[in-house]
Amino acid sequence: MESKNQTIKQFYARHLAMFGIVFCIIAIIAMLVISPKFGYNIAPLLSILVISILQYFMVYITIGEDFITFRPALIRSNINVLFDEIKSIRYEPKKVFIEYCNKITKQESTLKISLSVLDNDTKTEFLNTLHTVLKDKES
């Protein structure tokens, strides 16, 4: 059981979340300095701040021994793809496209993973891991 957990890699979409957190904190401070009696106007910024903090701690992609789990947003459910369901993988500068066929429903789909939400180190580690585990599926 312990060896299985060592082969699972998790990647976080923290690049844009950090921007949202910093922007909201600066905007809230600026609004409170400009007009402190209108504190209720910061409610939308507080909600964006909370969402950004949740995104910061949310796992974006998990690569396990024989699967990939992709979670594109907070409210959307996970998309799980087994390695043996993957037909091909294509790399582009800002996205990775994974073509797969669900074994149960026989439905073919494309998993589009945006790389712009990953910081440079995470993006490099993710692409290297993907290349290592799916090198036979690359087109």
Image: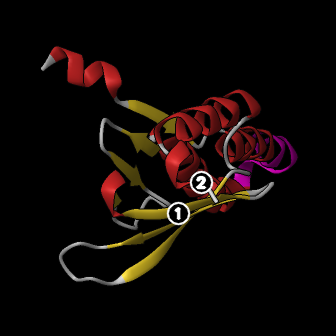
Badge 2 amino acid = Glu
| Nearer to me, 76 or 66 | 66
Is residue 109 located in the magenta-colored stretch of the structure? no
Real-space Cα separation, disc 1 to disc 2, in angstroms: 6 Å
State which region is magenta.
29-37
Query: What x and y, as percent, mark residue 52?
Result: 58, 47
Residue 30 is covered by the magenta coloring: yes
Furthest residue in direction front, as rendered: 136
Residue at the disc numbered 1: 88
What is the quadrant of residue 6 in the picture? top left
x 29%, y 73%: residue: 102
Q: Bin the neighbour count of mark 2 within 10 Å (Cα to Cα): few under 14, some 14-19, many 20 and up.
A: few
**Rendered position, 130 above or below 110:** above
Any part of residue 3 in sight: yes
Extreme right residue here? 34
Q: Are marks 1 and 2 in contact (CB under 8 Å)?
A: yes
Residue at 43 percent of width and 56 percent of height: 71
Image position of 100 (left or right of 117): left
SS class, disc 2: loop
Q: Which residue is mark 2?
A: 138
Q: Quadrant of the N terminus?
A: top left
Horizontal side, residue 45 vs residue 108: left or right: right
Is 17 positioned to the left or the right of 8 in the image? right
The answer to which quarter of the image holds residue 126 is top right
Q: Toward the viewer: 11 or 53?
A: 11
Where in the figure is residue 40, as x and y percent of width and height? 62, 59
Left or right: residue 135 compared with residue 69: right
